[in-house]
Amino acid sequence: MARLNINGTTREIEVDPDTPLLWVLREQAGLTGSKYGCGVAQCGACTVHIDGNPVRSCVLPVSGLTAEQKITTIEGLSKDGSHPVQQAWLKLDVPQCGYCQSGMIMAAAALLQTNPKPTDADIDAHITNICRCGTYNRVREAIKQAAAGLPAKQST
Amino acid sequence: MSITTPVSRRSFLIGSASAIGGLSLGFHVPFAGAAPAKTAQEVNAWVVVQPDDTVVIRIARSEMGQGTLTGLAQLVAEELECDWSKVTTEYPTPGQNLARNRVWGNFSTGGSRGIRESHEYVRQGGAVAREMLISAAAAQWKVPANECFAANSVITHRPSNRKVTFGKVATAAASVTPPKDVALKDPKQWKIAGKPLARLDTVDKLTGKQIYGTDLQLPGMLNATVRACPHFGGKVKSFDAAAITSRKGVRKVLQIDDATLAVVADTWWQAKTAMDALPVVWDEGPNKDMSSESIAEMLKGGLEAQDAFVQTTVGDAPGTLAKAKKTISAVYAYPYQNHATMEPMNATARYTPEKCEVWVPTQNGEASLAAAAEAAGLPVEKCEVYKLHLGGGFGRRGMQDYVRQAVLIAKQMPGTPIKMIWTREEDMLHGMYHPTTQCKLTGALDDEGNLTALHMRISGQSILAAVRPQGMQGGKDPVVFQGLNLTGDEGHLGYTVPNLLIDHAMRNPAVPPGFWRGVNLNQNAVYMECFIDELAHAAGVDPLQFRRKLMKNHPKHLAVLEAVAKGIGWETPAEKGRHRGLAQIMGFGSYVAAAAEVSVTDGQLKIHRIVAATDAGHIVNPAQVERQVEGSFVYGLSAALFGECTVQGGRMVEDNFHTYQVMKMAEMPAVETHIVPSGGFWGGVGEPTIAVAAPAVLNALFAATGKRIRTLPLKKHSLA
Ligand code: FES
Ligand code: FES
C-alpha cells in the first residue's frame, strides 16, 4: 500500500512497494502521459516533478515516497495546457512523434522553475532527455521563448 | 490562453465509429466515455463531413512524427476547398481497405513515400468530393453546377450569390455519382498545401493525452512482456515456469514459439519483473561463435571477391584503373545500428475463434493485418487492425514480429485483450538492424587532377534478401545501390565519371537486417562523399571545385550543393580553429546537401553549425520539411558519432541507452535549412538528409585534423 499525493490529490494505492513510481502512475493511477523509454534513468521520457524537482520516475520505487511529497505529472502541469512551457511548445509546434515530449516538457518546466533565464549551457546541462525524432533545436528555442515570457513568433 | 482545437482527434475517432452507420472506422471500443458525434456523412472515401461543417480527412499512411498526417490532409483540403480550421483526421482500418477494394491504396509508410507516392490520388479524392458537394448544392437550388463554386467550406451560386455550407449538403452529396476526371490545381495556385501550417496532431502531445500503443486500455485487459532467445537463431532449451507462477499478479507463463517466452500478468510491471525472475536456459543455436570481428572478416573477403552483382557501369573502370599512373584506394566500414524508437515495440491483441483484433502502432497496417491473420490462423476477413500514432518508426515498425507475438499470446487466452510491451532491452536485442557493409573504393586521377575512373565495391548485407526476397533481381538486391544508380528516383549519382563500376558482393551474416531511416543511402553517402573528398585532396583541388567539375551534367545535385556552400560561406575563410566539410546526394526522390562547420579541441569534436539544402520538387509543408531536415541530423549524427550494435557470442551486446548512446541536446549543432524546390517532381523528405549528415561532418573533421575516419562510429577513434 502506498499513500501518494499525485497532482494535488492524495490516493491510497494498493501496490508492491518496490514498484517504480512510473508504473504506479501508468498502471494504478491511470496517468499514461509519463512514458517508459528505457527503465534505467537514461532517456527522461518518464520525468515527473517531486516537490518541483525533475525526477526520472522509472527508477524510483514508491516505497521511497511519502504522502507529503507532491508528485506532479504532465497531466497535472496545468489544467488546460496553459503552462508557459506548453504554450511555447504549441507555438513552435515542437513535437514530432511526441513520445519523448511529456518528459521534455516536465524537464523544461522544472529548469525554468529554478532558473528562469537559462543560458544555452544551462539548457545543455539540464535537458538530457533523449529525442530520437530530433526536436532538440525546437525544444531549445521553446525553452527560451517560455523564459522570455513574450509572445512567441509564429511557427514556421 | 488555453489550448483548443475544433475537435480533438481522439474524440473524433470514437465519434465517427458510431456515426458512420455500417462503416466502422477508428476505435470503436477502446476509449470509454466519449460522446459520439451526432451524424457524419461520408462524401467519398477520403472525406467525411459533419453537420457542423467539421471535415474529417481520412489518412491511410501512418503518423510517426514525420508530419505526413498534416501534409496529406493539406493536399486533400486544398482540392476540397474546405475551411482548414475545421479539418480533423482519422485512420481508416486495413480491414476496411480490403473490404472496399483497397480504396485508400497502400498503407505502407516508409521510404519517404507517404506524400510522393499518394499525392495524386489523395488530391483527386479531395477534388472529387468537392465536385460532389457542389453538384448536390446545385441540384438543391436547381441551377447548373458550373455556376457554383466552393471556397472555405462554403458553396456559392455565383449569379444569385446563394450560399450553403458543406455540412448542409453532405448527405445529398454522398449519393451524387462521382465525376471521373477532375483537373487538379497547379501547385502555384495552392492556398493550403505548400504553406507552413502547424501540425494537426500537436495538442494532445503537450498534455499527455495522446494515446500511444503502450498507453492503451481495454476493458478486462491483461499485460504481457516477452523474452526471445538473445542469440540469433537460438531457441529456448528449458524454463521453469513454476518458479514464477505464484508471483503476485502473474496469470500465465507460456512459450509462444521455439525462441520466445511470454509472461501475462495483471500489470506490465508484474509481468516484467516475473520475466526477470524466470529461470531460462537458452540453446544458443548455430551462430554462437559469430562476432563483429568474424562478420568484418567475412565482409572483407567480399571486397576482393571475383563474383559480384554489377549495378552501375560506364566505360571500362577496371581497365582504366589498371593502366592509370595515379590511383587512390580506401576501405570504409559501416556497423549494425538499432532503430531505437523511443516507444518500444508493442501491440495489443484480442483473439476469439470468430475474430482477432489488434491495436498497434505500425508503419504498415495491411502488413499488420496479414501478420495477425497468419498468427491467429483465421481468414483475414475475420481480423482487424486499429492503428495508433507511433512513438517513432524509422523503419522498424514496418516489420510485424511484435504483432505476431501479441496475437500468439492472445490466442492462448481467448477473449482477453493482451497488451504486450517489449522492454527496452528486448527492443535493443531483437532489432531489425541497419545492415553492415564495407566498401573499397579505387579511383584514378590524370595529370590535371581529373577523376578518370572509379570502382566502388560494396561487400555486405542485403536487406531484401532477408525481408523481401521477391524484390530481388536474379539474386541481386537493387536497394543496396541507393544513391549510386545512373538514373531513377531512388537515387542517381550526381557525378559523371567516364569509367565507372559499382558492384556488390553479397555477404549475409545471421543478423536480421531491416529498413532503417535512410536505409542504404546512409552508408553509400559516407563511402562516396568521403572518398570524393579524398580524391579532391589527392588531386590538390578544393573539394567544392573538384565536385563542380564532375557535376556539370547534374544541375539539381549541384544546386543544393551550391546552396549549402554559399550558406556556410565556403568561399570565405572560417573563424580560426573551425573547419568545414561538404556532402551531397540524391535519394528518396530528392536532392540534398549539407555543409558542416566543426572544431576539435583536445581531441573533442564540436559541431558548431550545419547548413542543409533540400530540393524535393514540390513542397507540401515547408515548416514540416524544416523539422524533418533538423531531425535528420539528430538521427544521422547519432549514427555517425555513436551508433553501433556489437555482435558477441551470436548476440548483440548493447541493450539500453547507456551502452547504445544517442545524440542529446548538448551535442546538437545549429541547423540552417534551405528549402530550394525546383518543382516538377515529388520527392521525399523524412530520410534523404540523414545521408549527408555523417559525410559532411567527417569531411570537416578531416579538414580539422588531417585524420580520415573510414570506420564508424566516430566514438571508436581518438581525435587527439
Ligand atoms: S524511462 Fe525513465 S529515464 Fe527512460
Ligand atoms: S518527438 Fe519523437 S522521440 Fe522526441
Image (cartoon, rainbow, N blue to C red):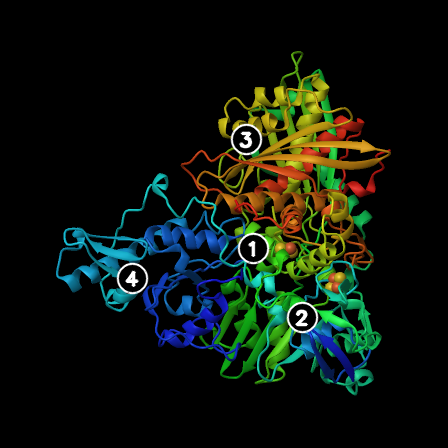
Q: Is residue B515 left or right of residue A129?
A: left
The chain identifier of the residue carrying mark 3 reads B
Distance from the alpha carbon under mark 1 to that under mark 3: 31 Å
- Identify the secondary structure beneath mark 4: helix
User: Real-space Cα distance between discs 3 and 4?
Assistant: 43 Å
Residue B632: image x %, image y %? 62, 45
Q: Amino acid at mark 3?
A: Val
Q: Earlier in the sequence, mark 2 or mark 3?
A: 2
Where is B419 relative to B203, above or below? below
Q: Chain of mark 4?
A: B
From the top left corner, tell me how far across and down residue B215 is, in percent: 62, 71
Q: CA distance from mark 1 to mark 2?
A: 30 Å
Mark 1 in CB contact with mark 2 (< 8 angstroms): no
- Label 3 or label 4, whichever lies nearer to me, is 4
Say above or below: B382 vs B336: below
User: Quick check: can you spot residue B73?
Assistant: yes
Do the residues indicated by labels 2 and 3 lie within the same chain of the protein? yes
Q: Residues within 10 Å of mark 4 (few under 14, many from 20)?
A: many
Q: Which residue is mark 2?
A: B421
Q: Earlier in the sequence, mark 4 or mark 2?
A: 4
Label annotation for residue B560: 3
Q: Which residue is mark 1?
A: A90
